[in-house]
Image (spheres, helix red, strand yellow):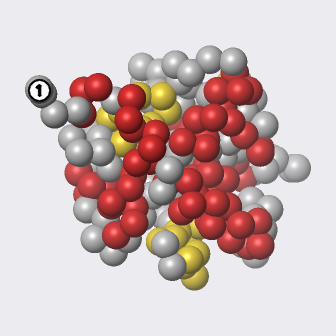
Amino acid sequence: MHPYPGRFFYMESAGQAGYMEDESLCVRCSRLEKTCCQRSEIYVTPGDVERIGEQLERFDFFEYRLPANADYADQDDDPAWQEYVFQADGTRRVLRRRPGGDCMMLGPHGCRLPWEVRPLVCRLYPYDYDERGIKPQLLHGCPVHLLKPGESLIAVLDMNIDAARRWHGQLYEEIRLETMANVDRLDLRPAC
Ligand code: SF4
Ligand code: SF4
C-alpha cells in the first residue's frame, strides 16, 4: 500500500550482471536496477521530522507533495492513513528528492541516516500493512528475480517481524500527531 520506501546499501558500479559472492541483495539491486531509495516518495511522520531534524540540525529536508501515482491517494482500505496523512489539499509530507528521483538522504554507500532515525516507512519496507497490522504478503518492489536459488526475501533483508510490529504501532501513533503538526501550514488556513 505505501509504495517503495527504501532501506539499504547502494553501490555505484552499475552494469555488472550476475551474482557476486557475499553481495547483499540490496547491493545487487543497486548494481542492476533502480533501488527503492531512487524511485520512492517517502512520507515522514511528525516524529520522523523531529528525529531527522535533530540528526541533521536542519529542517529543510521535506516538502508537501501530491502523490506522483494517483492510485496512492486512494486509501479506502486504511481510513486512518486517509484521514491523518493527507492534507486538505491532497498533499502529504515527503522527503525531498534530487533531480532524477534519488532520495536526498541517499549517499554513495546507502542511506545516510542511522537506522533508528530513518523514516518509519523505510524501516518497515517491504512489509505491507494497514492500521490493523502487517499483512502476510510483502509489497512488490524488491527484485525477487535477483535472489539466489533458495533465498527468501525477508531472510536476506534481515527483517525482524517483532521490530516491524513495534514500528508499525509507532507509525500509526505518529500519524495521529499530524493534526497538531499542521497548524503551521499557513497555505491551508482558510482565507479571512
Ligand atoms: S530515507 Fe534512507 S532508506 Fe529511506 S528512501 Fe531515503 S535513502 Fe532510502
Ligand atoms: S532489494 Fe529491495 S530493499 Fe533492497 S534496495 Fe532493492 S528495492 Fe530496496
Query: Residue 71 appears at what percent x and percent y?
Result: 26, 57
Give whichever of 25, 3 is nearer the camera: 3
The residue pinned by badge 1 equals 192
Give whichever of 98, 87 is nearer the camera: 87
Q: Is residue 2 left or right of residue 19?
A: left
Please tell me in which quadrant of the rendered image residue 157 appears: bottom right
Q: Residue furthest front?
A: 192
The residue positioned 56% from the left and 54% from the top of the image is 174
The residue positioned 80% from the left and 62% from the top of the image is 158
> Would you say residue 111 is visible in this rendering?
no
The residue positioned 47% from the left and 71% from the top of the image is 130
Q: Assign the N terminus to one quadrant of the image.
A: bottom left
Q: Secondary structure at mark 1?
A: loop
Ligand 1 within 8 Å, label 1 CB? no
Answer few, some or many: residues within 10 Å of disc 1's Cα (few below 14, many 20 plus, some between 14 and 19): few
The residue positioned 33% from the left and 60% from the top of the image is 83
| Above or below: residue 136 compared with residue 92 | below
Q: Is residue 68 left or right of residue 144?
A: left
Please tell me in which quadrant of the rendered image residue 104 appears: top right
> Would you say residue 89 is visible in this rendering?
yes
Report the number of numbered marks.
1
| Above or below: residue 177 compared with residue 74 | above
Query: Residue 122 appears at what percent x and percent y?
Result: 61, 49
Q: Is residue 75 left or right of residue 189?
A: right
Q: Assign the C terminus to one quadrant of the image.
A: top left
Tag 1: residue type?
Cys
Give whichever of 151, 19 is nearer the camera: 151
Query: Residue 68 appears at what percent x and percent y?
Result: 29, 42
Give whichever of 147, 160 is nearer the camera: 160
Query: Residue 145 appears at what percent x and percent y?
Result: 58, 62
